[in-house]
Amino acid sequence: MNIEEIREYCLSLPCTTEDMAFGEDNLLLRVGGKIFVCIGLDGEDYTALKCDPDYATELREHYAEIAPAWHWNKKYWNQLRLRGSLSDSFITALIRHSYSEVVKKLPKSFKTDHPEILEIKE
């Protein structure tokens, strides 16, 4: 899965927006104003995703392409190397997990106004 495919998939999820608030080297994908994916645009071919802390540790132990995300809270954020052997379906599942982790923390009023965000399953 390449960077553009990841971007397109993320934008297909309800209420997703994109910006480059950290500069031109990172594309941020947000739901409800909160980041769930950071795509590196500096040629390093990586993506940072939010993750449940226990699941984050498990993933790091089992996949060489997954490590604690650089410049992010390493308890909650994993970095995926896209040139490895991770399948597209596995990457999209990790994106949905990240999205769901962020949605869980959004205010109830936002979830009430946008019930479609609750329909995304991990």
Image: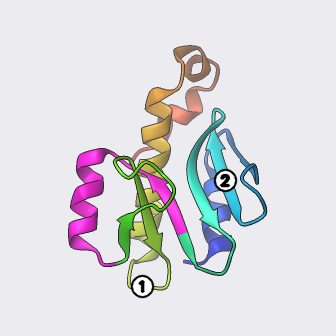
Q: Quadrant of the N terminus?
A: bottom right
Q: In the rendered image of this protein, does residue 33 appear above or below residue 99?
A: above
- Whether the magenta-drawn stretch holds residue 61 is answered as yes
Q: Residues within 10 Å of mark 2 (few under 14, many from 20)?
A: many
Foreground of the two, 16 or 116: 16
Judging by the rendered image, the residue that carries numbered circle 1 is 84
Which residue corresponds to the image point at 58% horizontal and 78% vertical from the top-left?
45
Which residue corresponds to the image point at 27% horizontal and 63% vertical from the top-left?
59
Question: Label 1's element?
Answer: loop
Query: Considering only order in the chain, which callout, 1 or 2, is on the residue closer to the N terminus?
Result: 2
Foreground of the two, 68 or 52: 68
- Whole-angstrom CA distance, mark 2 to mark 1, is 22 Å
Q: Quadrant of residue 93?
A: bottom left
Residue 19 in picture, x, y percent from top left: 76, 50
Q: For this view, does 66 lie left or right of residue 35?
A: left
Q: Quadrant of residue 2?
A: bottom right
Q: For this view, does 63 lie left or right of residue 115?
A: left
Q: In the rendered image of this protein, does residue 74 appear above or below residue 67?
A: above
Residue 114 in picture, x, y percent from top left: 62, 26
- Whether the magenta-drawn stretch holds residue 74 is answered as no
Residue range (magenta): 47-64
Three-letter amino acid code of the residue under disc 1: Gly
